[in-house]
Amino acid sequence: MHKNLLRFISQIRESLKYRFFYGYCNILRVLKSRQPPQVDWRPLDPTLPTLVAIARDVDMPLLAYCLRTLMINATTRPPIWLIGDSDQACIALNHWFPNLPPDVQTFHWETLLTELSSDYQHFIRTWLHSGYYGGYAKKFAITLAANLHADILLTDADVLWFGDFFTPLQQQRHQTPTILSGQDYARTYDFEVAATLAEPQLFEGEPLNCGLVYYPQGVLVQTLTSDLLSTLLSYAAHATCHLEQTLIAYAFWQTGGQWLSSDMIATTMSDNFRLRQRVVAHARHYAGGKHLFWRDAY
């Protein structure tokens, strides 16, 4: 009886902890999403890789704080491409970013899709119509297309910036001109696709997180060729939520990719249930932790 009572009390305590913390973060989300935050656009530095971001209409508040914190911590800014993943998202871009500098470009994702060859478009449209996770095909498409134009830094909307990311990035990209990425806290790949790709490091190497990745111009189509993707078409037709990350990780290992240090980019849940952030890095990707994004957004 005594053990049962202790177990019951423990369950109540855990339930209250979850309810309080997630309720607290949700209140912060509501308060911070009421109106667009001020973004003080820094002077353009064309030597930096183009920052590319795609977002759904409901994720525009995330993207707004992503760019706000980037500008707070930068003295100059990169060229920027902002992509809406639907007609509604493109309308939302205008609402959340009402005073864009003339050189910050906005696109509908399908505009970039049409720049790819028909073989790539077939793979992406197959993926797009695969089911619940088809939307990831849009991010993959704009990553390929943007990378044909320039060196790019692809960021998810749920990234916040806390320091000078670009100075060490510039040093590393010039020393090692290959794909640069941060590590994940878990191996989140489609293992059937990974087995077909037959890249041992997908199973043996450290796990990659594709929420913030640097790509030298043209590197992706050199590795993820249309012929290769055609062999994966059946997987695109029944895509899982991890197909994109598996493909990017394959390209990373095939091109001798290098890790960004944990001082530069963190992807972690180590400070979950903390009222204040306890992770120190120039940037943080809140994969699996959108509630923590709203705790930390400023």
Image (cartoon, grey):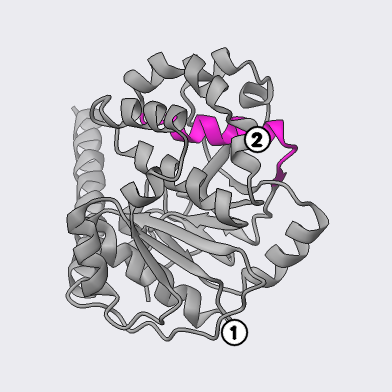
Residue 74 versus residue 79 in the image, above or below:
below
User: Which residue bears the numbered disc 2?
Assistant: 222
Q: Quadrant of the C terminus?
A: bottom left
- Mark 1, secondary structure of its residue: loop
Type of the residue with mark 2: Gln
Image location of residue 280, percent across then percent down: 57, 65
- Please name the predominant secondary structure of the magenta segment in the image: helix
Earlier along the polypeptide chain: callout 1 or callout 2? Answer: 1
Q: Which residues are magenta?
A: 241-258
Q: Which residue is mark 1?
A: 75
The residue tagged with tag 2: helix, strand or loop? helix
Question: Can residue 10 be seen in this snapshot?
Answer: yes
228 left or right of 35 in image: right
Q: Quadrant of the N terminus?
A: top left
The answer to whether mark 1 and mark 2 are in CB contact below 8 A is no
Real-space Cα separation, disc 1 to disc 2, in angstroms:
34 Å
Q: Is residue 154 left or right of residue 288?
A: right
Q: Nearer the viewer, residue 286 or 146?
A: 146
Residue at 48 percent of width and 14 percent of height: 192
**Residue farthest along the right direction in this orientation:** 175
Residue 248 image-quadrant placement: top right
Amino acid residing under circle 1: Thr
Q: How many marks?
A: 2
- Residue at 53 percent across and 71 percent down: it is 79
Is residue 291 placed above or below 10 in the rendered structure? below
Crowd rating for badge 2 (residues with CA inside 10 Å; few <14, some 14–19, many 20+): few
Magenta segment includes 243: yes
Residue 135 to residue 203: above or below: below
Relative horizontal placement of residue 157, taking residue 18 as reference (left or right): right
